Protein backbone atom coordinates (compact mmCIF):
# COMPACT_ATOMS: atom_id res chain seq x y z
CA UNK A 1 0.00 0.00 0.00
CA UNK A 2 1.37 3.35 -0.99
CA UNK A 3 1.48 6.17 1.58
CA UNK A 4 1.03 9.82 0.80
CA UNK A 5 1.98 12.69 3.02
CA UNK A 6 -0.44 15.60 3.15
CA UNK A 7 1.38 18.83 3.92
CA UNK A 8 -0.95 21.69 4.77
CA UNK A 9 0.10 25.30 4.59
CA UNK A 10 -1.97 26.86 7.37
CA UNK A 11 -0.23 30.22 7.47
CA UNK A 12 -2.14 33.33 6.61
CA UNK A 13 -1.00 35.53 3.78
CA UNK A 14 -0.76 39.12 4.88
CA UNK A 15 1.16 42.33 4.33
CA UNK A 16 2.60 44.41 7.14
CA UNK A 17 3.17 48.16 7.26
CA UNK A 18 4.77 50.01 10.14
CA UNK A 19 3.54 53.48 11.12
CA UNK A 20 5.30 56.02 13.32
CA UNK A 21 3.30 58.94 14.66
CA UNK A 22 2.42 60.75 17.88
CA UNK A 23 -1.33 60.17 17.67
CA UNK A 24 -3.62 58.07 19.83
CA UNK A 25 -4.92 54.86 18.30
CA UNK A 26 -8.44 56.18 17.72
CA UNK A 27 -7.07 59.18 15.80
CA UNK A 28 -4.94 56.96 13.55
CA UNK A 29 -8.00 54.78 12.90
CA UNK A 30 -10.02 57.89 12.05
CA UNK A 31 -7.42 59.13 9.55
CA UNK A 32 -7.18 55.67 7.96
CA UNK A 33 -10.97 55.45 7.73
CA UNK A 34 -11.09 58.82 6.03
CA UNK A 35 -8.19 58.24 3.61
CA UNK A 36 -8.83 54.59 2.72
CA UNK A 37 -12.65 54.59 2.92
CA UNK A 38 -12.64 51.92 5.64
CA UNK A 39 -14.74 51.43 8.74
CA UNK A 40 -12.47 50.34 11.58
CA UNK A 41 -14.10 48.90 14.69
CA UNK A 42 -12.13 48.95 17.95
CA UNK A 43 -11.27 45.78 19.81
CA UNK A 44 -8.46 44.52 22.02
CA UNK A 45 -6.37 41.42 21.72
CA UNK A 46 -4.40 39.66 24.43
CA UNK A 47 -1.05 38.45 23.12
CA UNK A 48 1.55 36.40 24.95
CA UNK A 49 4.93 38.03 24.46
CA UNK A 50 8.45 36.67 24.62
CA UNK A 51 8.51 36.71 28.43
CA UNK A 52 5.36 34.51 28.55
CA UNK A 53 3.34 37.45 29.83
CA UNK A 54 0.00 38.38 28.34
CA UNK A 55 -0.45 42.01 27.33
CA UNK A 56 -3.50 43.79 25.94
CA UNK A 57 -3.02 45.59 22.64
CA UNK A 58 -5.63 47.72 20.89
CA UNK A 59 -6.73 46.28 17.57
CA UNK A 60 -9.02 47.84 14.98
CA UNK A 61 -10.66 45.71 12.30
CA UNK A 62 -12.25 46.51 8.95
CA UNK A 63 -13.48 44.24 6.14
CA UNK A 64 -13.52 44.89 2.43
CA UNK A 65 -15.99 42.26 1.23
CA UNK A 66 -15.73 43.28 -2.43
CA UNK A 67 -11.98 42.61 -2.59
CA UNK A 68 -11.95 39.88 0.09
CA UNK A 69 -9.48 41.75 2.26
CA UNK A 70 -9.32 42.36 5.99
CA UNK A 71 -7.54 45.39 7.40
CA UNK A 72 -6.15 45.59 10.92
CA UNK A 73 -4.63 48.46 12.84
CA UNK A 74 -2.56 47.03 15.68
CA UNK A 75 -0.96 49.07 18.42
CA UNK A 76 2.70 48.11 18.84
CA UNK A 77 2.72 49.17 22.50
CA UNK A 78 0.84 47.92 25.52
CA UNK A 79 1.58 50.64 28.04
CA UNK A 80 5.36 50.95 27.49
CA UNK A 81 5.94 47.36 26.34
CA UNK A 82 6.54 46.83 22.58
CA UNK A 83 4.91 43.86 20.87
CA UNK A 84 7.75 43.57 18.35
CA UNK A 85 10.98 44.72 19.98
CA UNK A 86 12.93 44.62 16.71
CA UNK A 87 10.45 47.16 15.27
CA UNK A 88 9.99 49.41 18.29
CA UNK A 89 10.40 52.50 16.09
CA UNK A 90 6.80 51.92 14.96
CA UNK A 91 3.82 52.92 17.04
CA UNK A 92 1.30 50.97 14.96
CA UNK A 93 1.07 48.25 12.36
CA UNK A 94 -1.38 48.12 9.48
CA UNK A 95 -2.01 44.55 8.41
CA UNK A 96 -3.71 43.61 5.15
CA UNK A 97 -4.89 40.00 5.14
CA UNK A 98 -6.76 37.99 2.51
CA UNK A 99 -6.27 37.92 -1.25
CA UNK A 100 -3.09 39.98 -1.14
CA UNK A 101 -1.83 38.77 -4.52
CA UNK A 102 -4.45 41.03 -6.14
CA UNK A 103 -3.74 43.94 -3.80
CA UNK A 104 -2.10 47.12 -5.15
CA UNK A 105 0.64 47.68 -2.57
CA UNK A 106 2.10 50.73 -4.26
CA UNK A 107 -1.23 52.57 -4.30
CA UNK A 108 -1.94 51.61 -0.69
CA UNK A 109 1.47 52.81 0.52
CA UNK A 110 1.02 56.08 -1.40
CA UNK A 111 -2.36 56.68 0.26
CA UNK A 112 -0.87 56.02 3.69
CA UNK A 113 1.97 58.45 3.04
CA UNK A 114 -0.51 61.15 2.02
CA UNK A 115 -1.79 61.31 5.60
CA UNK A 116 0.15 64.28 6.94
CA UNK A 117 0.00 63.21 10.60
CA UNK A 118 1.93 59.98 9.98
CA UNK A 119 5.65 60.64 10.21
CA UNK A 120 6.84 57.36 8.72
CA UNK A 121 5.19 54.54 6.79
CA UNK A 122 7.20 51.53 5.73
CA UNK A 123 6.49 48.04 4.45
CA UNK A 124 7.91 45.37 6.76
CA UNK A 125 8.43 41.63 6.70
CA UNK A 126 5.23 39.96 7.94
CA UNK A 127 7.25 37.11 9.45
CA UNK A 128 7.71 39.19 12.62
CA UNK A 129 4.02 38.64 13.41
CA UNK A 130 3.74 34.97 12.40
CA UNK A 131 3.58 33.72 15.98
CA UNK A 132 0.63 36.06 16.64
CA UNK A 133 -1.28 35.41 13.40
CA UNK A 134 -3.87 33.04 14.89
CA UNK A 135 -4.62 35.36 17.79
CA UNK A 136 -5.05 38.29 15.42
CA UNK A 137 -7.05 36.74 12.61
CA UNK A 138 -9.11 34.09 14.39
CA UNK A 139 -10.52 36.16 17.23
Image (tube, helix red, strand yellow):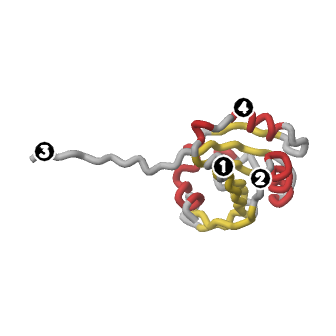
Residue occupied by mark 2: 38
- Mark 3 and mark 1 in contact? Answer it, CB < 8 Å: no
In this picture, residue 24 sits left or right of residue 75? right
Question: In what quadrant of the picture does the C terminus appear?
Answer: bottom right
Please rate how many residues cluster around mark 1, counting C-alpha atoms within 10 Å: few if below 14, some from 14 to 19, many from 20.
few
Coordinates of residue 81 in the picture (x, y in percent): 70, 59
Query: Could you tell me if residue 51 is visible in this image?
Result: no
C-alpha span from label 3 to label 1: 43 Å
| 70, 57: nearer the viewer | 70
Tell me how far mark 3 sits from mark 2, CA to CA: 51 Å
- Residues at marks 1 and 2, CA–CA distance in whole angstroms: 12 Å
Give the mark nearer the N terminus: 3 vs 2: 3
Secondary structure category for the residue under label 4:
helix
Q: Nearer the viewer, mark 3 or mark 1?
A: 1
Callout 2 crowding tier (Cα within 10 Å): few <14, some 14–19, many ≥20: some
Residue furthest toward the front? Answer: 66
Residue 3 numbered tag: none
Say which label, 1 or 2, has the lower sequence index. Answer: 2
Residue 66: image tag:
1
Residue 31 located left or right of residue 131: right
Q: Earlier in the sequence, mark 4 or mark 1?
A: 1
Q: Position of residue 125 (x, y in %)?
A: 60, 39
In this rendering, would 2 be left or right of 138?
A: left
What x and y, as percent, mark residue 133?
55, 54
The residue lying toward the viewer, choosing from 121 and 87, is: 121
In terms of secondary structure, where does tag 3 sit?
Answer: loop
Q: Nearer the viewer, mark 4 or mark 1?
A: 1
Mark 3 or 4, nearer chain start: 3
User: Where does the image place residue 77, in percent across and percent down from the top left?
Assistant: 72, 58
Spatial CA span between label 4 and label 1: 19 Å
Residue identifier under label 3: 2
Amino acid sequence: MQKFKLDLDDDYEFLLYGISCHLKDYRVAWYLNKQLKLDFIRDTVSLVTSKAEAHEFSLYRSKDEANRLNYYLLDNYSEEFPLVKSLKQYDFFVIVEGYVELFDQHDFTSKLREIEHLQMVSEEDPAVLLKYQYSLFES
